């Protein structure tokens, strides 16, 4: 019986993928998971999707963050908000993986949806 790693390598080779490409893809943050995390942790104040109003009027919708600060990297905008929370913003923390997922979701909102 073939080992699972050999089967995976054979499947990747058949698909024209290198092991490095598969590993890189596995490390990419998932915006869909980021949306779920954002909805759970941020959705009580912010609109976290492509449409809708923020439940808390002073909280900017995630899709508008880049437009509010043109020329600034979205990661810097979010990190600034996370590092200097205002009094209305609750105290929270995310681990590195969750932060990457949420940032990937926010970044995905800054571009028009695919048709």
Image (tube, helix red, strand yellow):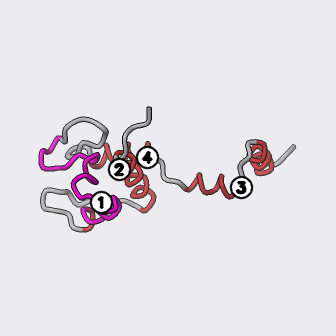
**Neighbourhood count class around disc 2 (C-alpha, 10 Å): few under 14, some 14–19, many 20 upward:** many
Q: Determine the CA span between mark 2 and mark 1.
A: 9 Å
For mark 1, what is the residue? 78
Which quadrant holds residue 86?
A: bottom left
Res 53 quadrant in image = top left
Question: Where does residue 2 sit, x and y in percent of width and height?
Answer: 85, 45
- Residue 37 is left or right of residue 24, and the answer is left
Residue occupying image coordinates x 26% and y 68%: 83
Tell me which segment is drawn in magenta: 55-81
First reached walking from the N terminus: tag 2 or tag 1: 1
Q: Position of residue 110 (x, y in %)?
A: 34, 48
Q: Nearer the viewer, residue 6 or 31?
A: 31
In depth, the one of 70 and 39 nearer the eye is: 70
Q: In this view, does 112 lie to the left or right of 9?
A: left
Q: Could you tell me how far apart the alpha carbons at marks 4 and 2 are, in whole angstroms?
A: 8 Å
Q: Which mark is residue 50?
A: none
- Whether the residues at callouts 3 and 1 have beta carbons within 8 Å, the answer is no
SS type, badge 4: helix
Mark 4 = which residue? 31
Q: Which of marks 3 and 1 is nearer the N terminus?
A: 3
Q: How far apart are marks 3 and 1 (CA)?
A: 33 Å
What residue sits right under mark 3 in the picture? 19
Q: Alpha-carbon distance for marks 1 and 4?
A: 15 Å
Q: Circle 1 — which element?
A: helix
């Amino acid at each position: 019986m073939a080992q699972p790693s050999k089967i995976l390598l054979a499947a990747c080779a058949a698909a024209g993928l290198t092991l490095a490409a598969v590993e890189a893809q596995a490390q990419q943050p998932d915006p869909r998971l980021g949306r779920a995390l954002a909805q759970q942790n941020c959705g009580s104040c912010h609109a976290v999707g492509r449409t809708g109003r923020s439940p808390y009027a002073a909280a900017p919708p995630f899709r508008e963050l880049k437009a509010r600060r043109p020329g600034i990297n979205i990661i810097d905008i979010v990190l600034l908000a996370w590092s200097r929370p205002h009094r209305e913003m609750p105290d929270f923390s995310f681990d590195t993986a969750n932060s990457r997922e949420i940032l990937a979701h926010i970044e995905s909102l800054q571009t028009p949806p695919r048709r």
